[in-house]
Image: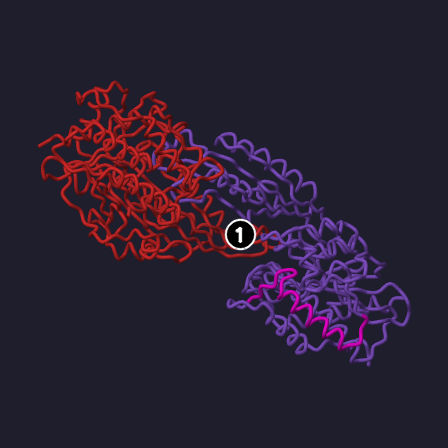
Chain colours: A purple, B red
Amino acid sequence: MELDKLRVNGRRLQASLEAMAEIGATPGGGVHRLALSDEDKGARDLFVSWLAGMDLEIVVDEMGNIFGERPGDKVLPPVMTGSHIDSQPKGGRFDGILGVMGGLEVLRTLSENDIETKRPVVVVNWTNEEGSRFSPPMVGSGVWSGELDINWVFDRTDINGKKLGEELERIGYKGSAAARSRPVHAYYEYHVEQGPVLECEGKIIGVPKGIFSIHWSDVYLDGTANQVGPTPMEGRNDALCSAAEMILKVNKLPSKMGDNMVATVGEIQNYPNSRNVIPDHVHFTVDIRSWDDDLVSRAWDDLRNDFKVIASRRGCDIRLEETWKVNHMPFDERLVNGVLKTADQLGYSNHFMVSGAGHDASYMAMTAPTAMIFVPSIGGRSHVEVENTTWEDCEAGANVLLHAVLKSAMEG
Amino acid sequence: MELDKLRVNGRRLQASLEAMAEIGATPGGGVHRLALSDEDKGARDLFVSWLAGMDLEIVVDEMGNIFGERPGDKVLPPVMTGSHIDSQPKGGRFDGILGVMGGLEVLRTLSENDIETKRPVVVVNWTNEEGSRFSPPMVGSGVWSGELDINWVFDRTDINGKKLGEELERIGYKGSAAARSRPVHAYYEYHVEQGPVLECEGKIIGVPKGIFSIHWSDVYLDGTANQVGPTPMEGRNDALCSAAEMILKVNKLPSKMGDNMVATVGEIQNYPNSRNVIPDHVHFTVDIRSWDDDLVSRAWDDLRNDFKVIASRRGCDIRLEETWKVNHMPFDERLVNGVLKTADQLGYSNHFMVSGAGHDASYMAMTAPTAMIFVPSIGGRSHVEVENTTWEDCEAGANVLLHAVLKSAMEG
């Protein structure tokens, strides 16, 4: 068969995604498949059964990362592709799983057409990309790439105090292989965009130049609780009012610092959280992202000063924690250009862009040439049950992945 | 004994309060004695055992209100005093219980001195004043005074879906007497101030002219959830940012409408409450209080308009619910002046003021001449574990209560 004519089986890809969407399905049409939950185990089992049906070499490492390897003609560093099976709480049916099923579909297409590649091709599922149950996110690729310490990761706990390492053992996915990087010739990650850009631009394929810098922080405020009725406004130390002012500062940060930024407060806890008691403890999170690392640092400095002024004016104590920070991660120029060219050759409209969301590709880019392929999210919606992408676009992205992988796998 | 010289036993009052503070004691030095909990039952049992030890007529009505009646010389409408045994979650050791123990101490003082009063004197514990476990508050006095329907109150549920009526039966305090008002000659409620006014003024006894109008409402916001990274600031429908603007509007309401007002957001729930998801659902409460009923109505109208403008500008749907409203409740002028005079006669500095907090006295004032007696809350703190009042002030307030009750009970 002429390689140029090779295409994935869109219906089969759809069927794989639909089968996966049943595991942890929510009434609202999404999936709830938190890392290392029974649902995660169920989806992993199905993935492994599909790999086993293809006669691949299956490796599960001590982080629970699952690799299915199709040998090449030569013993050379492989081409790798994949993403993650876990989801956000009440998340969507495409985030993560599309990249794993897309990679599987590429392998199936190569196998049924008896395509011999020079290099091995590996499909991977990375453990706990979302970080919703166990923070931080992307620990599977983080440990594998050597950026995170495995014992520290094993000790991360969920809201019920369960440790990541114990839950990994419980679901039977603590493998024996070392979670340690090996030379990889090229890593491709196929994912839904999770934003509105492709839809707005009317393009099918998005090719990010890299991933935004991400800065996470936690703010803790202490004021004074009191009965709301007899306590005059004057002299109150209302922690929730302080937080409200700060939330609006975060919201205005991008327009203050420049467009190339998003800033969000996603989480807030208020205590004692009683209708007739002035709040005395508030915790909230701040997420700042930009392509420009320095801009993120300057924004955080600026915000920190604003926060201190607000807290002091409102008589609250403030404690700030920088919880997580990654610099922006540019992808491999040659691979990125290759993906753009592949999309052109296959006749899919495409758009050179940037990724505001973090991905396992961030850590992979530290150890191997890396690129990503995006397809449109309908309405730009993601991390929600109504997350959606057309089956046509899923197939288009998988075809771009197929030919990008193939090109790299044929390199000597 | 000369009646003028009669004084309560401050040490005995302290001992009663200390014994009660052990029931539901928290590590932080407060009490957690939610309405109709096992702790509430324990404290009720102790109260009833003390009443029984004094040879009073004990009546428990179908609302669980407990009355201990000391007969008078004549069959006349009684003088009644009391408050409530239940507490806020992690509340203080004085809120409510001081008024019940104060009333008990008055009866004990009358009995041990063989004082014969013309009218009966009744001490009462009202069921569920706080409204923390079962909303709304003050349902015991509300039903008794005929303002609330008993079956509606019985159907109120706690956060676990348990009904108030069932919990009342479970703890054995659903009595057989009808919860229906009888003629009462005078009702006095002794309570900690729960605010900073007496401390600021350097006065021992506070005498409120009445209770603020209280307006409770609930705000529900619906925006659009999305992954924070890839979603541009432009076009977001962030429900938490909308709420933050509204919280600050509530906070500024009193200075906008006039000083004679307090306004507070005490409670907020944010969904999905995940660090990297734009919030799409927020619920928060608003509490507005003032002496001036019209001002409260105008403030709520003003706020409602502001809320709608904010929600519309930020692309959020808004739903507003008026949850509870009581008009301001002026106390009986003759009784209030009597309490002020009594405090003067006993040599306690005193202050004519207003109550920002709601009390059972609100409902009682609808059926009987009513007045209240306040003593200082240290630091103005209440509804918190560190709530405190000096034993000297507790004793002073009980002496004022004693002589106010005595004066009314001697009236023919």
Where are the magenta residues, as a range? A30-57
Relative height, residue A186 to residue A160 (above, below): below
Residue at mark 1: B273
Image height of B121 relative to A329, above or below: above
Q: Is residue A40 magenta?
A: yes
Residue at the (39%, 50%) spot, across then down: B219
Q: Position of residue A272 (x, y in %)?
A: 46, 42
Q: Is residue B104 left or right of residue B250?
A: left
Is residue A148 covered in magenta? no
- Foreground residue, B39 or A326? B39
Badge 1, how many Cα within 10 Å: few under 14, some, many 20+?
many
What residue is shown at x 76% (from left), y 67% (from top)?
A123
Q: Position of residue B48 (x, y in %)?
A: 29, 43
User: Which image quarter holds the N terminus of chain A?
Assistant: bottom right
**Nearer to me, B326 or A325:** B326
Relative to B127, is A123 above or below? below
Snapshot quadrant of residue B246: top left
